[in-house]
Image (tube, helix red, strand yellow):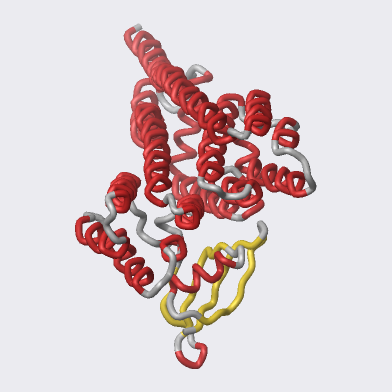
């Protein structure tokens, strides 16, 4: 079967055509070549276009479902249950249809003689590069059950951090949405009516305070141009989102996050925590430093730091210790390079970096809680100030015009 694909290779977008037995087989083949597919089109007979499949359109599996599957697989393997039997059992027990389908296919691959890590690699929307590489290392080292325990812990910690971020930002986001909706509601519905009342009271030539006149003019502009305003907002959002999805746009967006006053600390500490735990897990699994750096860079989720890790890998390849290039990075705190140096001297990089990861994960939690505590009163003040300004703009002129009428 033939496919057209669009993919990322070495930070560049490429397009091509390839043959494969299935959509998943093509993804596995491209990943093996260092190519990460973005979109895949199945070609029909005579080169016609068939079904359009987006690799990023695959249904995601909840992290909790993946944690349960990983822990149960580790337990069954350590208890001596054959791998294929373990997979069949877990495939029938899981509540996630997407994960069930993947496990069924993985079971068939393993029964056909394929290594478990290779079978997992065909489902990148479920099993990340870190997950796959650690499973492969566990198979090669004969410690698959232990590696799966570490993987379950790592996935749980990632899920915990994401949940904490969502929970901390929920109330500020609700306030922000309420503020925006209230602003448009006041400008499009309430202010025009108030303008009519003021005109009825004082006549068309009534003198109004400057701030009241500005609000009325702005409201008048929005009422008569709201279609254009919303169209412009939609176009701007579309362009920005499309740009951020490009390699250059994503890099610049991540660079912006690393330079914004408040987001800088959160982004940096999250990246350091993820780097430390992922790199430590891969090293403890027996993955080489260079391979671990390549996989870790892609798992951090920040293109700027990923680029720095690629440059660090080049220096390691030339004979330098990893702590040297890390110490020169503007985005890694000095403690990280110092702890790395200690780990390199003692041969316990994984143990040392786990401690670093624990520290920065706690720091991220504290920062997020503090940020939420700051944002909430700020949003309340902004919303209250907007309402107060509008109230003053309305009540003052009404009172003044009422006195004039009374006199």
Q: Position of residue 87 (x, y in %)?
A: 29, 61
Residue 81 location, quadrant: bottom left
Residue 153, quarter of picture: top left
> Can I make out residue 352 in this image?
yes
Is 252 on the left-hand or right-hand side of 65?
Answer: right
Above or below, 396 against 328 in this view is above
Describe residue 93's horizontal placement relative to residue 326 as left or right: left
Q: Residue at x 41, y 77 (%)?
A: 51
- Which image quadrant for residue 156? top left
Q: Is residue 177 visible?
A: no
Q: Position of residue 112 (x, y in %)?
A: 37, 75
Q: Residue furthest top?
A: 407
Q: Position of residue 344 (x, y in %)?
A: 66, 33
Answer above or below: position of 205 versus 45.
above
Residue visible at 50% across and 32% down in the picture: 217
Asked whether, in this view, residue 308 is left or right of residue 220, the answer is: right
Q: Quadrant of the C terminus?
A: top left
Image vertical order of residue 116 relative to residue 256, above or below? below
Q: Nearer the viewer, residue 385 or 127?
A: 127
Q: Residue 270 in the image: state x and y as whole percent.
A: 52, 33
**Point 50% across, 50% down: residue:** 130
The residue that appears at 40% across and 56% down in the rendered structure is: 126
Counting labels gives: 0
Q: Residue furthest right?
A: 318
């Amino acid at each position: 079967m033939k496919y057209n694909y669009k993919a990322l290779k070495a930070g560049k977008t490429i397009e091509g055509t390839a043959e494969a037995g299935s959509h998943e087989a093509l993804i596995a083949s491209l990943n093996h070549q260092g190519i990460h597919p973005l979109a895949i089109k199945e070609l029909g007979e005579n080169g016609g276009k068939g079904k359009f499949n987006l690799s990023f359109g695959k249904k995601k599996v909840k992290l909790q479902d993946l944690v349960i599957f990983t822990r149960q697989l580790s337990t069954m393997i350590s208890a001596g249950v054959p791998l294929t039997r373990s997979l069949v059992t877990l495939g029938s027990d899981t509540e996630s249809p997407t994960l069930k389908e993947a496990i069924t296919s993985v079971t068939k691959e393993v029964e056909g003689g394929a290594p478990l890590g290779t079978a997992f690699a065909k489902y990148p929307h479920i099993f990340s590069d870190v997950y796959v590489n650690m499973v492969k290392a566990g198979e090669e080292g004969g410690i698959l059950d232990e590696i799966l325990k570490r993987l379950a812990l790592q996935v749980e910690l990632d899920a915990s951090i994401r949940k904490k971020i969502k929970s901390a930002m929920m109330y500020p986001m609700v306030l922000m949405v309420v503020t925006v909706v209230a602003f448009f509601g006041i400008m499009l519905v309430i202010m025009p009516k108030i303008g009519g009342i003021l005109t009825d009271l004082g006549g068309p030539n009534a003198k109004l305070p400057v701030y009241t006149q500005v609000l009325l003019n702005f409201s008048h502009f929005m009422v008569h141009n709201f279609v254009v305003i919303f169209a412009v907002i939609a176009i701007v959002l579309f362009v920005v989102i499309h740009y951020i999805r490009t390699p250059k746009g994503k890099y610049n967006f991540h660079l912006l996050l690393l330079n914004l006053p408040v987001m800088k600390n959160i982004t940096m500490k999250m990246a350091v925590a993820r780097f430390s735990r992922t790199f430590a897990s891969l090293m403890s699994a027996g993955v080489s430093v260079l391979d671990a750096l390549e996989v870790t860079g892609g798992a951090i989720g920040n293109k700027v730091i990923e680029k720095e890790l690629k440059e660090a890998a080049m220096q390691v390849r030339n004979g330098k210790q990893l702590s040297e290039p890390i110490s020169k990075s503007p985005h890694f705190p000095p403690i990280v390079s110092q702890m790395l140096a200690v780990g390199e001297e003692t041969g316990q990089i994984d143990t040392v970096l786990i401690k670093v990861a624990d520290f920065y994960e706690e720091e991220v939690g504290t920062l997020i809680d503090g940020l939420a505590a700051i944002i909430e009163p700020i949003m309340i003040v902004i919303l209250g100030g907007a309402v107060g300004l509008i109230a003053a703009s309305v009540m003052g002129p009404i009172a003044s015009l009422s006195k004039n009428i009374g006199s």
